Image: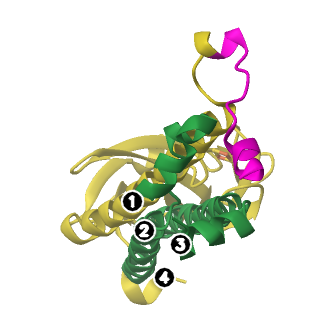
Chain colours: A yellow, B green
Amino acid sequence: MAEKELHHRPEKIPSWKSDFPIEEEQATHVGRREFAKFLGLLSGTLALGNGVIVIKALAFPAKPLEGEHFVCNADEVAVGKMFQFEIEGSKIIPYILIHLEENEWRAFEQKCTHLTCAVRYREDLGKIECPCHHGFFSADTGEVLQGPPPRPLPRLEVVVRDGKVYVREEQQEQTV
Amino acid sequence: MSNFRRSQNEAHPNKTNTLMTAIIVLLILFVGIQIWFLFGALNNALQDNIYFALTTFIGSFLLALASFWLLRYLPDPLKKSQKKGNNQKETNKKE
Ligand code: FES
């Protein structure tokens, strides 16, 4: 009996406790519950984001470039120079045309595959340079030579006919 | 009166703590894997790799389900009335 009374004797409550009637233990407890719920929400959002990627890839597949596009006259671009142009499809994509050597032409997308900075042809190095983080691409194939870009530059096929330069989507068998 | 739940709680007062920590660690693990999936899918989607996107989506979805399911096991918050010694008897009755 005496033991029981000891157990249930009311503690003396300091006055600040009545001013702030929130127990520390209780407060932290709720915080962790909320944190866990927030993590659950985040998890759901991430799954949703992954789903959006799938839907986007299924509903709006990247269309290959159709037909040939006139770029410029062949004598406008000297050997070792580059020429910027754009092709308007569902969106405007900038490209560069490079006159590597006599009768050697290349066309690549100008957006760096790292963070879409505009790349440029460096004649002195014979490479394509991205000035943002010093990524280098091969001017011949568009492959990454150095730096952070994860993928090669998308490439177009160049056709020169009657002194005029055209580009078109690369034929499948010619891709490396 | 004393019941199984109460005696369990008294014998292992740290149990809710451990449970909470375990759940949060698991959730962080799940979310971490999902971020990894999403990052990979974003990178691969640029290369038109639909299968990778699909696989990571399924994985991510399952992980999200697992997270929601884990939330069911969150321990209940401590009862408010427990803080007063006077109410101890009543609280125990309620439980
Ligand atoms: S944007 Fe081209 S290297 Fe980073």
Please determine if labels 2 and 1 lie on a single subunit. no
Is disc 2 placed on a helix, strand or loop? helix
Viewer-nearest of discs 4 and 2? 2
Could you say which is closer to the camera, residue A29 or residue B10? B10
Return the x and y of residue B16 as percentages of the image width and height.
64, 60
Mark 3 surroundings within 10 Å by alpha-carbon count, few (fewer than 14), some (14 through 19), many (20 or more): few
Q: Which chain's residue wears label 2?
A: B
Residue behind mark 3: B3
Viewer-nearest of discs 4 and 1? 1
Residue behind mark 1: A44
Taking the image as shown, residue B48 lies to the left or right of residue B31, namely: left
Mark 1 surroundings within 10 Å by alpha-carbon count, few (fewer than 14), some (14 through 19), many (20 or more): many
Q: CA distance from mark 4 to mark 3?
A: 74 Å
Q: CA distance from mark 2 to mark 1?
A: 5 Å
Q: Which residues are magenta?
A: A1-17
What residue is shown at x 48% (from left), y 69% (from top)? B70
Please determine if labels 4 and 1 lie on a single subunit. yes
Check if mark 2's residue and mark 1's residue have beta carbons within 8 Å.
yes
Residue behind mark 4: A175
Please determine if labels 2 and 3 lie on a single subunit. yes
Quarter where residue A117 is shown: top right
Return the x and y of residue A159 as percentages of the image width and height.
38, 66
Q: Which chain's residue wears label 4?
A: A
Please determine if labels 1 and 3 lie on a single subunit. no
Viewer-nearest of discs 4 and 3? 3
Can you see residue B43? yes
Residue B64 is marked as: 2
Check if mark 1's residue and mark 3's residue have beta carbons within 8 Å.
no
Return the x and y of residue A75 as percentages of the image width and height.
46, 46
Taking the image as shown, residue A131 lies to the left or right of residue A58, namely: right
